[in-house]
C-alpha cells in the first residue's frame, strides 16, 4: 500500500500529490511520506527547508526522496534579492527582516568550539551569491571598497541592508541570492531511520560551525539516525557543512565556548558518554551510505560527523574546494571530518583542492581509508588521537603535504605518498578505545606515537623548494626533532601552540617492509627489505581539459627488484594498546589483495597502490570524467 507522491513547480499543496495532481512543495510531501513511500520531485528550484516527518522501522520500509529521472530538482536555502542601487561602485539592496522569520543569518555570527579565535571581525552564516558564485564576506565596510566580489551587511530592527562590490557586473542584470534558511533537507526530529535522498542539487544554506561538541547541522543531514542512503546528489555552497551524520543537541552544544570551565576535549569525552546513555550503538545509530555525490565550495566540511557516522560507508564521491576560501578557519575542517568513525569505510573518493582532505579523529578503530585519490590539497590526510586498529591502503596522496600522524596502531599499506609526513605524540589527551566492532568502551590511553605498520608503500619527495625543509618518508622515526619543531612553528603557532614538546616521549616500535623511497626521500634506517634511490620521479597528478585525471611517474629500475609479501590480518597482528585484530567490519579476516582499481594481487604484489606500475615511465588514467 505504499504511496508515490509527486512534487512540481506547477503543482498545489491542496492537490492529492499524484503525477496528474502534484504538490507544489517538497515539504508538503515530506509531511505525509511514511514507510515504503516515495517522493518524486520534478524539475525546478524549490526554496524551502525540508524536514521529513517520518522515518522507517527497518530496511523494508525505506522512504525515498528522489529527483525525477533526467530532471534537475534544486533545493535552495536562499532567496532572490532585487532592486539594487549603486553609489561609488558599491551596490545596495534592502530586505525586510520578515523574510527571515526567527532566523536572520546576517545577524547570526559564526562561533563555537575549535573555531580559530580571535577573529579580527565576526563572520556570519549569511552569504551573498551572484549567478551562483559566492562572494567574500568583507570584515568591515572599508574592506568592501578594497575587495572585488565581496559583500557586507547591516542588520536593523526592521530591515537588513546588503552591500556588494562586484567585478563590474550590474546586480540588476544578474541572479542575486542571499542565504535565508539554515538547511535544505534536515529532520527537526532525531531517530528518523532508513531514508534515501537521491539525485538532488542542494545549495546556499546558512549552516553553522559544526565541531564535535555541538549539534552538527548540515545543509543535508540525518540528525542522529540510522540507515540513510545519500546518493547521486550535487551539494555546494553550504556556509559550513554540506552533509552531516553527526552529533545531536542533547549531548552538549559548544560547552567550552559557553562556559570555559574545562578543556574542550573534556566536554568531547562527556559528549561520547552522554551518547552512550542515549543509546549510541550499532543497533540505533549510523550504518549510512554516502555515495556518488559531487560536493564542492563549502566553508568547513563536505561530510562531517561525531559519533553518528559509525559503521558507515562513504565512497564514489568527488569533493573539492572545501575550506580553501579562507574567510574563517578552525580545527574542524576537511573534505571529510569524522570523529569516532568506528568500522567506517571510506573508499574510492576523489578529493582535491581542499584545505584538508580526510581528517579521522578520535576512536578511528576499525576504520579503513582505501583507494582514494588526493591531490592539490593543503594536507591530504590527518589521523589524530586514536589507538588502532585502522587501515590506510591503496591511496594516492598527491599533494605536497600528505599525512599528519598524531595516532598510533595504524597500518599503512600499498600507498603512494608524494610528499611531507609528520608524526607527533599526544600526551595531553587521553582518548577511548573500544571492544572490537562495538561502541562499548574497553579502555582509555594517551597517544605515544608509533606502533604503526608501513608495508609496500612508495615514498617520494615531490615538494617545492620552499617546503623541502620538511623531511619526507619515514625520517621522523630516525630521531629528527627539527621536523616536529618546524612543524609546530609553521603550523600550530598560528592557532595556539601545541604543548607536545614539553612531555617526555614514550617510544613504541614500528614495522616496515618492502617500501620504495624515491627522489632521495630518506628511508627508515632499519628497513632492510626496501629500496632507497636518488632517482627523480617526476611524479605529477595531471587533469586533462576533458576532466580526466592521470598519474605520471618515473620509477628507478630497482623498483622491479622489490619482492613484497601480501598483507593480511595475520601479518598485521594487533596494535599494542587496543589489542584488537585488524579485520573487516563483520569480524572476518581482511586481506589487502586488490589494488586501487580492484585488480587482484598475486603472491608478490607490486609495491604501491597500482599493480600495473613498473620501472621506468608510467602514465596511468586514474579517473575518467563522466
Image (cartoon, rainbow, N blue to C red):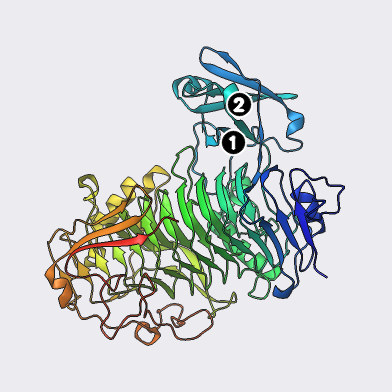
Distance from disc 1 to disc 2, alpha carbons, whole Å, reads: 10 Å
User: Residue extending furthest front?
Assistant: 20
Q: Which residue is mark 2?
A: 153
Image-quadrant location for residue 423: bottom left
Q: Are marks 1 and 2 in contact (CB under 8 Å)?
A: yes
Which is nearer the eye, 315 or 111? 315
Residue drawn 74% across and 47% down?
A: 8
Q: Is residue 139 visible?
A: no
Q: Which residue is mark 1?
A: 124
Label 1, secondary structure: give it.
Answer: loop
- Residue 245 appears at what percent x and percent y? 60, 60
Q: Is residue 570 visible?
A: yes
User: Residue extending furthest top?
Assistant: 88
- Residue 66 appears at what percent x and percent y? 67, 58
- Residue 23 appears at what percent x and percent y? 80, 49
Image-quadrant location for residue 86: top right
Which is nearer the eye, 494 or 458? 458
- Side (left or right) of 507 relative to 108: left
- Residue 498 appears at what percent x and percent y? 39, 52
- Side (left or right) of 591 relative to 515: right
Relative to 497, does residue 607 appear above or below in the rendering?
below
Amino acid at each position: 500500500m505504499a504511496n508515490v507522491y509527486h512534487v512540481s513547480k506547477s503543482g498545489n499543496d491542496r492537490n492529492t500529490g499524484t503525477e496528474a495532481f502534484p504538490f507544489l512543495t517538497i515539504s508538503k510531501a515530506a509531511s505525509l511520506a511514511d514507510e515504503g513511500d516515495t517522493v518524486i520531485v520534478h524539475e525546478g528550484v524549490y526554496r524551502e527547508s525540508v524536514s521529513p516527518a517520518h522515518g522507517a522501522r527497518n530496511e523494508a520500509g525505506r522512504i525515498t526522496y528522489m529527483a525525477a529521472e533526467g530532471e534537475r530538482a534544486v533545493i535552495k536555502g536562499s532567496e532572490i534579492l532585487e532592486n539594487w542601487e549603486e553609489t561609488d561602485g558599491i551596490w545596495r539592496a534592502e530586505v525586510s527582516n520578515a523574510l527571515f522569520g526567527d532566523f536572520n543569518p546576517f545577524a547570526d555570527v559564526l562561533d563555537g568550539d575549535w573555531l580559530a579565535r580571535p577573529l579580527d571581525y565576526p563572520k556570519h552564516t549569511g552569504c551573498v551569491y551572484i549567478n551562483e558564485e559566492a562572494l567574500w564576506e568583507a570584515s568591515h565596510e572599508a574592506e568592501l571598497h578594497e575587495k572585488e566580489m565581496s559583500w557586507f551587511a547591516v542588520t536593523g530592527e526592521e530591515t537588513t541592508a546588503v552591500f556588494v562590490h562586484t567585478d563590474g557586473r550590474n546586480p540588476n542584470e544578474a541572479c542575486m541570492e542571499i542565504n535565508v534558511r539554515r538547511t535544505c533537507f534536515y529532520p527537526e526530529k532525531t531517530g528518523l531511520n532508513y531514508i534515501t535522498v537521491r539525485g538532488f542539487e542542494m545549495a546556499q544554506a546558512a549552516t553553522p560551525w559544526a565541531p564535535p561538541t555541538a549539534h552538527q547541522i548540515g545543509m543535508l543531514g540525518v540528525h542522529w539516525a540510522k540507515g540513510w542512503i545519500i546518493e547521486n546528489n550535487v551539494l555546494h555552497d553550504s556556509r559550513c557543512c554540506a552533509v552531516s551524520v553527526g552529533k545531536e543537541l542533547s549531548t552538549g552544544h559548544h560547552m567550552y565556548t559557553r562556559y570555559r570551565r574545562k578543556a574542550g576535549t573534556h566536554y568531547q569525552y562527556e559528549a561520547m558518554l552522554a551518547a552512550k546513555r542515549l543509546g549510541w550503538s550499532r543497533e540505533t545509530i549510523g550504518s549510512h551510505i554516502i555515495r556518488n555525490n559531487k560536493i564542492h565550495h563549502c566553508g568547513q566540511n563536505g561530510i562531517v560527523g561525531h559519533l553518528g557516522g559509525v559503521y558507515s560507508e562513504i565512497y564514489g564521491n568527488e569533493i573539492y574546494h572545501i575550506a580553501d576560501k579562507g574567510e574563517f578557519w578552525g580545527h574542524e575542517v576537511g573534505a571529510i571530518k569524522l570523529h569516532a568513525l568506528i568500522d567506517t569505510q571510506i573508499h574510492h573518493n576523489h578529493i582535491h583542492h581542499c584545505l584538508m582532505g580526510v581528517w579521522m579523529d578520535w576512536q578511528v578503530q576499525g576504520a579503513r581509508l582505501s583507494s582514494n585519490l588526493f591531490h592539490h590539497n593543503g594536507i591530504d590526510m590527518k589521523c589524530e588521537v586514536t589507538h588502532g586498529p585502522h587501515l590506510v591502503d591503496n591511496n594516492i596522496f598527491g599533494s605536497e603535504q600528505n599525512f599528519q600522524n598524531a595516532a598510533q596502531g595504524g597500518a599503512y599499506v600499498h600507498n603512494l605518498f608524494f610528499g611531507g609526513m609528520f608524526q607527533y605524540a599526544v600526551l595531553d589527551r587521553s582518548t577511548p578505545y573500544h571492544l572490537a566492532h562495538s561502541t562499548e568502551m574497553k579502555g582509555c590511553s594517551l597517544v605515544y606515537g608509533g606502533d604503526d605498520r608501513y608495508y609496500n608503500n612508495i615514498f617520494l619527495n615531490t615538494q617545492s623548494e620552499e617546503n623541502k625543509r620538511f623531511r619526507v618518508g619515514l625520517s621522523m622515526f630516525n630521531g629528527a626533532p627539527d621536523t616536529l619543531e618546524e612543524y609546530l612553528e609553521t603550523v600550530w603557532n598560528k592557532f595556539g601552540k601545541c604543548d607536545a614538546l614539553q612531555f617526555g616521549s614514550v617510544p613504541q616500535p614500528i614495522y616496515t617492509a618492502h617500501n620504495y623511497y624515491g627522489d632521495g626521500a630518506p628511508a627508515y634506517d632499519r628497513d632492510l627489505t626496501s629500496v632507497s634511490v636518488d632517482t627523480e620521479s617526476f611524479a605529477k597528478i595531471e587533469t586533462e581539459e576533458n576532466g580526466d585525471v592521470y598519474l605520471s611517474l618515473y620509477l628507478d629500475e630497482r623498483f622491479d627488484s622489490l619482492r613484497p609479501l601480501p598483507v593480511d590480518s595475520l601479518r598485521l597482528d594487533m596494535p599494542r594498546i587496543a589489542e584488537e585484530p585488524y579485520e573487516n567490519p563483520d569480524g572476518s579476516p581482511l586481506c589487502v589483495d586488490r589494488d586501487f582499481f580492484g585488480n587482484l594481487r598475486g603472491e608478490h604484489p607490486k609495491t604501491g597502490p597500482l599493480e600495473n606500475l613498473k620501472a621506468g615511465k608510467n602514465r596511468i588514467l586514474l579517473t575518467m570524467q563522466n
